[in-house]
Amino acid sequence: MRIEEIPASPKKPKVTRVAAYARVSSDKDAAFHSLEAQTEYYQNYIAAHPDWELVAIYSDNGISSKTINEIAAILTSMGVLTPAGRTKWSVSTVRSILSNEKYKGEALLQKTFTVDYLTKEVRKNNGEVPSVRVRNSHEPIIEPEVFDRVQEILAESTKRRAKVRTKHPFAGRLICGDCGSFYGHKVWRLRSTGERYNVWYCNHKYDGDKACESPRLRDEEVKEAFEKMLQKYGDSNPVYTDERWNKLVESVKVCRGGHLIFTLTEDRVVKVTL
């Protein structure tokens, strides 16, 4: 009988796949070089860690000016998988990531609580029970200042929507494609006939030296665009009603040339042209 010892196989080092994101907020030459510098920095930084593997460096020259809907569309078009491994990004997933304190090195405990232990009903904790914030609980992957600024931007967006007090279905949903501000409405009157009609345009269209060039729209034109969207969407009865608008439309980005980009509550984006 011969007994031979078989040595254990050496463990392969665990490799962490890493992606980096670089951005600048203008298209000037200096900004371009800044983007190059950021890309080079991330390449060198990741290469200095032997247990890291560079997947990709995503660069952008102005994503900070885009809406969450557009960010979701960009990530989907780039083929980036969601945390759940899906190919399509939703608004709620992007918003969840942007507001997740774990990325800044913190942990928030007791985010939910059990209402009834018999029914096992669980609700989001909106202050009903105490919560605990653990600062510096782990190494952050983004600077806390950047995370805090993102929260300010999200809060500002929420406040802008809250300021829209009119009950008109278009209020708070038409967004200027030039500056990102909401559209407001005015009642205009034709001198020739005395006819009155609603006109929608950017609230900052006539502010400052440079006016936004996004188009003005009448109620009828918005409704026409909605019906075109329904046709493109494959709806069997593409007819506008306030109820359908409120149910389907999350926002509409109004761009130069009469292009309207509908973001629907189902996270689908449809573009139409008047």
Image (cartoon, rainbow, N blue to C red):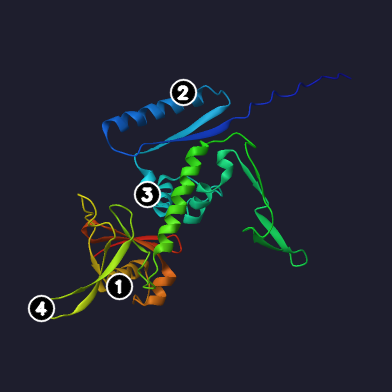
Q: Quadrant of residue 219?
A: bottom left
* Mark with earlier residue (1, 3): 3
Q: Which residue is mark 4?
A: 192
Q: Which residue type does callout 3 highlight?
A: Lys
Q: Which mark is residue 44?
A: 2
Q: Is residue 104 left or right of residue 191?
A: right
Q: Look at the numbered discs 2 and 1 and tell me whether their residues touch, using CB distance below 8 Å.
A: no
Disc 4 to disc 1, how far (Cα)?
Answer: 25 Å
In front: 8, or 196? 196
* Mark with earlier residue (2, 3): 2
* Label 2 element class: helix
Where residue 37 sits: x, y (%)?
Answer: 38, 26
Q: Which residue is mark 3?
A: 66
Dot 4: few (<14), some (14–19), or many (≥20) neighbours within 10 Å? few
In front: 49, or 138? 138
* Label 3 element class: loop
Image quadrant holding the C terminus, namely: bottom left
* Mark with earlier residue (3, 4): 3
Q: Which residue type does callout 1 highlight?
A: Lys
Dot 2: few (<14), some (14–19), or many (≥20) neighbours within 10 Å? few
Disc 3 to disc 4, how far (Cα)?
Answer: 41 Å
Front tag of 3 and 4: 4
Q: Which residue is mark 1?
A: 223
In front: 146, or 58? 146
Q: Which residue type does callout 2 highlight?
A: Asn
* Mark with earlier residue (2, 1): 2
